[in-house]
Image (cartoon, grey):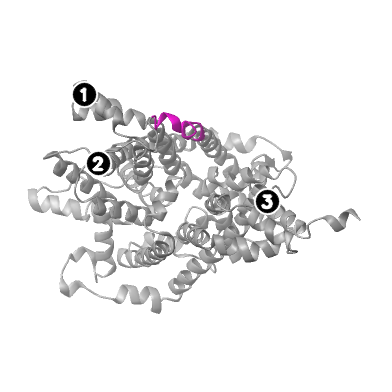
């Protein structure tokens, strides 16, 4: 008799919880287990192998140097820009805002390709311009170096610093600045001693995000560090998978990356939790723009300089190369051609298949992540299963797992019975689903919080079940928010490289992996055409997001 009173949808909620645990917990558990596996059983030999050679340890040190340097440079780039856009009468704010959004859209490995065209030691545009102007035998720029890698990664990652800092600045009223001015402080002293210190928790949180992004990415280091003959953790992990693959050693070598990420994510959460330190006067305080006078053109020049490094210059050279017969011949009408795009989209079966795979896998992954995230958020918000709140931590756990570490976990989990998925599309789809599940969950949870449960109770009082209430009441109310969440998962899924490079095979290649593979050939015209397709697909989805959800939906949700 007790079973008659149970909600018939309970089995569905339990199934969703089981799928979540399997997707997230299984790869990480298998990763940990694999790291201590040896021929004779459990062993620590894999850790000894992973950290007994100097070049392995040096790669770890290089990653830490890269992360710290990128964090500092992101602060140098992003904090002044955020202050200029949020607090001053600087002209051209819309242009700066568009460039920051454009930086979010361009994948870091495409930025690396662009900077190779710009600052390659011999043929790069900047070096060629330098030699033409000065008559020097060689240019001063070498992108294949640690400073070059730091610049490329920081130019791609500084929008985190910009968004976090601007969000904090938007909460600060002008009352404390007015008090400082009354006491005789000038503009720059007030900014440095009053305004920016109030945003310190946001700046530190953004520094940590930039640091984690730098040590976990694979694309830009693979394109710049490997030709430069130095290694970072992610490129070393990739080399462990060269034939024959050393999966156990790779799993052990990935542990410090996972540990550092978890530690810094915990620290970031502690910092973000101190929001009261950011906005002492609350949202209601009046906020007046600082008048810069003649300095406003200097500040605009700085913002345009940074956005030129991150967006305008890279996209200019990508466009030039994508539509050029030979990119080195420069800008001229007789050098223009549509052959590269036609070859990539029509003539080349491998590229055509990779294009289809990219958008199909991204779309299916986004849909699966959204359905699972919505189910878990509903379980947590409505208290449908015992200990349901713990599921929210599981759903957000992939946020602290670098993509390359997650990929190794999936490889260890699904290359042997009972479930062999390696070589199929499903291992990529499930990896992308897991990787970007936190984005879908955060947005689904926020959307559900805005709906009063009494609306569902009314349906149930009238005889409808919980599933009917979801279909007829909750679903229509969530349509707009879920559309934005779908786009926010779809976009990174279509350009994900760190996971795909380990899990794809010849029959399941995506554009990101194809672009990386083609980089060895040095055909930058085709590389740029492939990258341009990715960017145009992303722009189309962003424009759809603008229409469905509103302007700046990507940047607002990144800040939250």
Residue 495 position by quadrant: bottom left
Q: Position of residue 446 (x, y in %)?
A: 54, 50
Q: Is residue 213 left or right of residue 464?
A: left
Q: Residue at x 82, y 55 (%)?
A: 6
- In the rendered image, the quadrant that contains the N terminus is bottom right
Image position of 205 with respect to 538: above or below: above
Q: Secondary structure at mark 2?
A: helix
Do we see residue 423 in this rendering?
no
Marks 3/2: CA distance?
43 Å
Question: Which comes sooner in the sequence, label 1 or label 3?
Answer: 1
- Label 2 near label 3: C-beta < 8 Å? no
Highlighted range, magenta: 269-280
Is the residue marked by circle 1 packed among few (<14), some (14-19), or many (20+) residues within 10 Å? Answer: few
User: Which is nearer the eye, 323 or 189?
Assistant: 189
Read off the residue under disc 1: 182
Q: Residue at x 65, y 53 (%)?
A: 454
Is the residue marked by circle 3 packed among few (<14), some (14-19), or many (20+) residues within 10 Å? Answer: many
**Residue 457 counted in the magenta span:** no
Residue furthest top in the image:
183
User: Which is nearer the eye, 25 or 14?
Assistant: 14
Do we see residue 175 in this rendering?
yes
Residue furthest right in the image:
1
Marks 2/1: CA distance?
22 Å
Q: Position of residue 481 (x, y in %)?
A: 50, 58
Q: In the image, which disc is placed on residue 84? A: 2
Residue 535 position by quadrant: bottom left
Marks 1/3: CA distance?
54 Å
Q: Residue at x 46, y 45 (%)?
A: 560
User: Which is nearer the eye, 156 or 254?
Assistant: 156
Q: Residue at x 69, y 56 (%)?
A: 457
Read off the residue under disc 3: 379
């Amino acid at each position: 008799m007790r079973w008659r009173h149970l909600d018939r949808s309970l089995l569905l909620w339990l199934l969703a919880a089981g799928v979540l645990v399997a997707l997230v917990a299984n790869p990480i558990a298998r990763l940990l287990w694999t790291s201590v596996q040896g021929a004779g059983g459990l062993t620590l030999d894999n850790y000894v192998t992973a950290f007994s050679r100097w070049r392995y340890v040096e790669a770890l040190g290089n990653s830490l140097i890269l992360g710290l340097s990128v964090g500092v440079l992101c602060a140098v780039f992003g904090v002044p820009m955020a202050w200029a856009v949020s607090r001053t009468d600087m002209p051209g704010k819309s242009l700066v805002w568009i460039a920051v959004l454009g930086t979010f859209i361009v994948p870091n490995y495409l930025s690396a390709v662009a900077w190779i065209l710009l600052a390659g030691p011999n043929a790069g545009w900047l070096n060629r311009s330098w030699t033409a102007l000065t008559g020097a035998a060689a240019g001063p720029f070498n992108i294949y170096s640690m400073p070059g890698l730091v610049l490329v990664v920081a130019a791609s990652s500084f929008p985190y610093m910009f968004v976090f800092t601007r969000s904090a600045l938007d909460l600060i009223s002008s009352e404390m600045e007015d008090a400082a001015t009354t006491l005789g402080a000038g503009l720059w002293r007030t900014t440095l001693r009053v305004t920016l210190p109030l945003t310190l928790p946001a700046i530190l949180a953004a520094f940590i995000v930039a640091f984690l992004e730098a040590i976990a990415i694979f694309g830009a280091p693979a394109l710049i560090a490997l030709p430069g003959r130095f290694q970072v953790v992610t490129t070393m992990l990739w080399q462990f998978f060269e034939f024959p693959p050393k999966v156990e050693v790779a799993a052990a070598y990935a542990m410090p990356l996972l540990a550092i990420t978890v530690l810094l994510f915990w620290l970031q959460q502690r910092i973000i939790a101190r929001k009261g330190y950011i906005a002492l006067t609350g949202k209601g305080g009046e906020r007046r723009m600082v008048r810069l006078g003649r300095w406003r053109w200097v500040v605009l020049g700085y913002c345009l300089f940074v956005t030129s490094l991150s967006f305008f210059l890279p996209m200019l050279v990508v466009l030039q190369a994508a539509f050029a017969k030979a990119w080195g011949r420069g800008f001229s009408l007789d050098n223009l051609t549509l052959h590269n795009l036609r070859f990539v989209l029509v003539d080349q079966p491998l590229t055509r298949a990779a294009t289809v795979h990219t958008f199909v896998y991204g779309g299916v992954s986004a849909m699966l992540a959204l359905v699972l995230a919505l189910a878990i958020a509903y379980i947590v918000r409505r208290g449908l299963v015992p200990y349901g709140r713990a599921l929210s931590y599981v759903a957000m756990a992939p946020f602290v797992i670098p993509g390359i570490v997650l990929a190794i976990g999936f490889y260890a989990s699904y290359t042997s019975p009972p479930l062999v998925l390696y070589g199929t599309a499903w291992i990529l789809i499930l990896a992308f689903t897991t990787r970007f599940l936190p984005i879908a969950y955060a947005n689904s949870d926020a959307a559900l919080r805005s709906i009063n449960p009494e609306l569902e109770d009314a349906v149930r009082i009238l005889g409808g079940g919980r599933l009917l209430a979801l279909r007829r009441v909750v679903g229509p109310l969530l349509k707009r928010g879920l559309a934005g969440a779908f786009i926010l998962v779809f976009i990174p899924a279509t350009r994900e490289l760190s996971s795909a490079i380990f899990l794809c095979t010849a029959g399941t290649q995506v554009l990101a992996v194809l672009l990386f593979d083609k980089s060895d050939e040095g055909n930058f015209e085709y590389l740029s055409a492939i990258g341009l397709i990715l960017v145009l697909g992303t722009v189309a989805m962003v424009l759809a997001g603008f229409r469905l959800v509103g302007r700046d939906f990507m940047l607002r949700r990144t800040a939250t």
